[in-house]
Amino acid sequence: MPPMIVDVGAVHELIARGAQLVEVLPKHEYRELHLPKAVNLPLSELDARSAQRLDRGRPVVVYCWDALCDLSPRAAARLDQLGFEVYDYALSKIDWMARGLPVEGSSATEPTALSLVREDVATCALDDDARTLRAGIDASPYGFALALRDRTVMGRVRRSRLDEAADGATAETVMEPAPATVRPHIPLDELERRFHHGGAETLILTTPAAELIGVVRQADLPGHGEEDRRAGSRVAASSSWRS
């Protein structure tokens, strides 16, 4: 049988058992970003001799970049043939980062969407009524609430949709069922492109499992707050001049 494919939850359980994390991507990719405490054993260098670096008494979890990359299943098959207890984290590094989990490496401190996350967005249940929704949104710094089932984002309720809604209306009946979301690992330049392309002022951060992490504001991007302040100063100066 081929080595078992595991998800992120099983990876955490294996780590708790003392598993060794092994990145099988090339060295330069490992140096940039890797899972905490992972070692690097590139597939191109994997053989019986190099595998001696690993402890045969502990499970081995191999990973590469993403689910389309076939380096980890190939490495898992090789290590299995060499007699190791090996597991393939097939979704790999991109899945780990997209969940907002910590990484190490030379690029680990570069800011991402997660570095700007805000957790003060209003949330509601699908059966919350319009009166409850209005109160929650009015107390929030945003003009919407996110309808959740457990932590899964089911939709977005805009305050404007509630102006004419009956008090008995629920989040489920007035929500937008598919608001755009982004993952927390994307760099700030890509985040800025997402804002520009969508014309939004706020974006929703979720994990690949659609679980809410928080929201990010365009105004919090580097330079945007300063531009807003300069624009405000120009308006104030213009108003002062007219008076």
Image: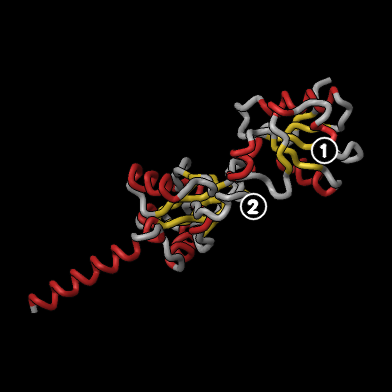
Residue in the image at 72% along x and 26% along y: 73
Neighbour tally class for label 2: few under 14, some 14-19, many 20 plus, Cα within 10 Å: few
Question: What type is the residue that disc 2 sits on?
Answer: Pro
Q: Would residue 99 appear left or right of 187 to someone viewing this image?
A: right
- Say left or right for 242 vs 195: left
Q: Write the residue at 42% across / 44% down.
A: 190
Between marks 2 and 1 in the image, the one whose residue lies nearer the viewer: 1
The residue under label 2 is 102
Query: Dots 2 and 1: beta carbons under 8 Å?
Result: no
Task: Identify which residue, 242 or 151, lies in the foreground.
Answer: 242
In the displayed image of the protein, which residue is found farthest to the right?
Answer: 57
Q: Quadrant of the rendered structure where residue 77 is?
A: top right
Residue plotted at (65% across, 44% down): 34
Outermost residue toward the front in this view: 49
Q: Which residue is mark 1?
A: 53
Q: Residue 224, image x and y in percent?
A: 34, 60
Do we see residue 96 in this rendering?
yes
Real-space Cα distance between discs 2 and 1? 25 Å
- Location of the C terminus (image quadrant): bottom left
- Name the residue nearer the viewer: 152 or 208: 208
- Position of residue 8 relative to residue 148, above or below, is above
Per the image, label 2 sits on a secondary structure element best described as loop
Q: Residue furthest left?
A: 242
- The percent coordinates of residue 221 (x first, y second) are 40, 57
Q: Residue at x 47, y 52 (%)?
A: 169
Can you say which quadrant of the picture contains the N terminus? top right
In the rendered structure, find residue 87 and report the number of the disc placed on it: none
Label total for image: 2
